[in-house]
Image (spheres, helix red, strand yellow):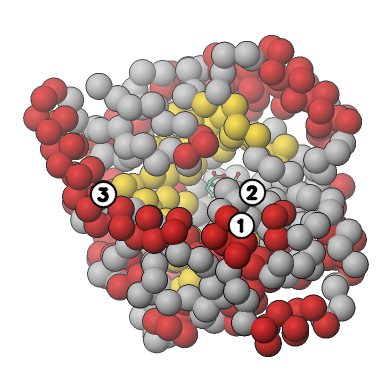
């Protein structure tokens, strides 16, 4: 029996790759162990006020995005991944089971429940199934985000390896291929889907977005997340979507009308105005981190690309790693009760995308940091998009 995964919870419900009562007992025991290891940390995340300074004695990360490769069979112009650092080749970043085993031993993983395999295109890593088995064996839930174009021949292996959830990112440039592939996966693995809504497409060709939803719904996807474009890659600001756009309201109404029974989760858009801490609900710099096989850190889902500049799990002392200046600035800015947006977070659709936890809002921000942020003139970008000046 399979549990359904839904995009709202990032697919964190775990289906099992086994069947029968043995499989259910094993799964039940694993989930109990997972709950015992990670439950208290989850509770602390929701009870203790967040602080700009990270202290592992209060809570540790819940989720990790693990880059298993930087190879990709597509070259999407919106891709969040930057070009490879100078002097390094694709082989330098390919995850091996040995490298992943070393990562999982790191203290930062002690509180992690879910590891999302990403890249590049994770299915291009030839050791992927072994890596998934390893992650499972070590008591984590392995998930994967993929462009889906290589999924057809790998689905049985993924299931046998014990993948917990798969999310297929659908793009305008892959819709026709996925229209062919996704229906063939029906019943083999629960697939959640997502689609990046680009501003110009939404305003000029909304039928392309409806087509993506139709393909997902008709192929038995368990649900779909409609993501909005975040500034990245070669696309410009015209692709940003704001919450008050009439084209967005039209699109939502049409999709609700045409697909009333298909579970759709609309991610929050970039906010045109931030009025205060109520609108800054991102929890990522506390809950989440990204890492590559070499131990380089990525900061959050916007600055996901791991880089030695952010610190390295094997080289940077732990307190320093978690409090490196980029992260500390983002945390301080998110906790700040005023309307100023940390420049690093300007235009990020995750800024208002976390669940508002009242405790977060009451967190006392160290006065010095608050004063510094308050006296800092907003950057042009922050000013423009937050309307906060
Ligand atoms: C970088 S991709 C890597 C995994 C895989 N190649 C894929 O495309 O799903 C990871 C996730 O980032 C999302 N993503 C990439 N560029 C984005 C952007 N500019 N704005 C929002 N999400 C983006 C993708 O849709 C995908 O869900
Ligand atoms: S978004 Fe995914 S599929 Fe597209 S280029 Fe980036 S890594 Fe590849
Ligand atoms: S709001 Fe800031 S911290 Fe949160 S994901 Fe975006 S850039 Fe990262």
Q: Which residue is mark 2?
A: 353
For residue 240, side relative to residue 262 (left or right)? right
Tell me the distance, in whole angstroms, between the alpha carbons under discs 1 and 3.
24 Å
Q: Residue at x 37, y 55 (%)?
A: 43
Query: Ligand 3 closer than 8 Å to the CB at disc 2?
Result: yes
Which sits in the foreground, 384 or 273?
Answer: 273
Which disc number belongs to residue 282? Answer: 1
Q: Are marks 3 and 2 in contact (CB under 8 Å)?
A: no
Q: Is residue 8 left or right of residue 96?
A: right
Residue 371 vertical position relative to residue 305 in the rendered view, above or below: below
Q: Is mark 1 within 8 Å of ligand 3?
A: yes
Rate crowding at label 2 as few (under 14), some (14 to 19) or many (20 or more) other CA atoms within 10 Å: some
Placement of 158 over or under 56, stated as above or below: above
First of labels 1, 3 by sequence position:
3
Viewer-proximal residue, 248 or 167? 248
Mark 1 vs mark 2, CA separation in Å = 6 Å
* Residue at figure coordinates x 65%, y 34% from the top left: 266
For the residue carrying disc 3, how many other residues have a C-alpha within 10 Å: few (<14), some (14-19), or many (20+)? Answer: some
Q: Is residue 64 visible?
A: no
In terms of secondary structure, where does tag 1 sit?
loop
Q: Are marks 1 and 2 in contact (CB under 8 Å)?
A: yes
Q: For mark 3, what is the residue?
A: 35
Q: Kindly identify which numbered label has been placed on residue 267.
A: none
Q: Which is nearer the N-term, disc 3 or disc 2?
A: 3
> Which residue is at a point 26% across and 39% down the rendered structure image?
162
- Real-space Cα distance between discs 3 and 2? 25 Å
Q: Is residue 189 left or right of residue 136?
A: right
């Amino acid at each position: 029996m399979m549990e359904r995964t839904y995009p709202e919870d990032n697919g964190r419900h775990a289906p099992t790759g086994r069947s029968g009562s043995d499989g259910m007992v094993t799964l039940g025991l694993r989930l109990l162990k997972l709950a015992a290891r990670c439950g208290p940390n989850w509770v602390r995340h929701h009870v203790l006020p967040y602080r700009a300074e990270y202290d592992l004695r209060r809570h540790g990360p819940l989720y990790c995005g693990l880059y298993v490769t930087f190879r990709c069979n597509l070259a999407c112009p919106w891709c969040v991944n930057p070009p490879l650092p100078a002097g390094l080749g694709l082989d330098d970043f390919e995850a091996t089971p040995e490298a992943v085993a070393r990562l999982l031993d790191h203290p930062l993983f002690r509180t992690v429940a879910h590891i999302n395999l990403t890249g590049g295109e994770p299915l291009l890593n030839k050791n992927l199934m072994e890596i998934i088995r390893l992650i499972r064996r070590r008591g984590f839930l392995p998930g994967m985000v993929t462009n889906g174009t290589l999924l057809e021949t790998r689905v049985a292996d993924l299931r046998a390896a014990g993948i917990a959830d798969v999310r297929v990112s659908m793009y305008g440039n892959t819709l026709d291929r996925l229209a062919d592939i996704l229906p063939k996966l029906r019943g083999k693995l629960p697939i959640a889907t997502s689609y990046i809504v680009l501003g110009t497409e939404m305003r000029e060709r909304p039928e392309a977005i409806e087509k993506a939803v139709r393909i997902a719904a008709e192929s038995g996807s368990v649900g779909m997340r409609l993501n909005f474009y975040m500034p990245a890659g070669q696309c410009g600001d015209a692709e940003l979507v704001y919450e008050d756009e009439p084209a967005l309201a039209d699109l939502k109404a049409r999709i609700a009308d045409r697909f009333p029974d298909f579970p759709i989760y609309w991610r929050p858009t970039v906010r045109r105005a931030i009025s205060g801490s109520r609108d800054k609900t991102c929890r990522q710099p506390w809950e989440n981190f990204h890492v590559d096989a070499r131990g380089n850190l990525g900061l959050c889902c916007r600055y996901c690309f791991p880089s030695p500049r952010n610190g390295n799990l094997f080289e940077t002392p732990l307190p320093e790693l978690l409090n490196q200046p980029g992260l500390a600035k983002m945390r301080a800015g998110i906790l700040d009760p005023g309307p100023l947006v940390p420049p690093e977070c300007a235009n990020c659709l995750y800024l208002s995308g976390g669940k508002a936890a009242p405790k977060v809002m009451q967190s006392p921000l160290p006065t010095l940091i608050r004063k510094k942020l308050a006296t800092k003139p907003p950057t042009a970008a922050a000013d423009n998009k937050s309307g906060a000046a």
